[in-house]
Amino acid sequence: MSNATLVEVIGGGTAGTPSGSVQTVQSPADGATLTKASVTMSGASAVLVTASATRSVVLVSSTEANGAAAIDPTGGTAALDAGVPIPAGTTIEITGKAAQSAMTQIGTNTQKLTVYTG
């Protein structure tokens, strides 16, 4: 597959028992400038980011206090049992062509995800 997709879990421990978190966020090696946004989850599938042909990275961080959260990096209907799980205290990174896709999220009502795009 050309333009390989990278999904990297940063921090976290064993499943359901996260133990780490990202302390600092720096611009990726490609020089992208990161923009930060907060997404409040509603318990239903909703937009995480819209598609962007110029985006090269998406970082998604779930706070220590969050309950369940998951994303669908294809932009389909997000589901906790079928998405990419993001345990509390974990950050994931999506790069390359995959970062340009629309993505959806689902999670515990009123909990938040922090999203960095660039």
Image (spheres, helix red, strand yellow):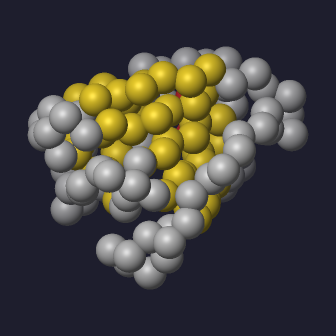
Note whether 20 is above or below 46 in the view shown.
Answer: below
State which quadrant residue 48 falls in. Answer: top left
Query: Which residue corresponds to the image point at 55% horizontal and 18% vertical from the top-left?
Result: 52
State which quadrant residue 55 falls in. Answer: top right
Note whether 71 is above or below 13 in the view shown.
Answer: above
Query: Which residue corresponds to the image point at 62% horizontal and 20% vertical from the top-left?
Result: 35
Q: Is residue 25 visible?
A: yes
Q: How many marks?
A: 0
* Residue 77 left/right relative to 23: left
Question: Which sits in the foreground, 47 or 77?
Answer: 47
Query: Which residue corresponds to the image point at 46% horizontal and 35% vertical from the top-left?
Result: 114
Note whether 100 is above or below 77 in the view shown.
Answer: above
Q: x%, y% of residue 79?
A: 19, 50
* Residue 21 left/right relative to 45: right
The image quadrant where one finds the N terminus is bottom right
Q: x%, y% of residue 39?
A: 35, 28
Note whether 22 is above or below 103 in the view shown.
Answer: below
Q: x%, y% of residue 113?
A: 39, 38
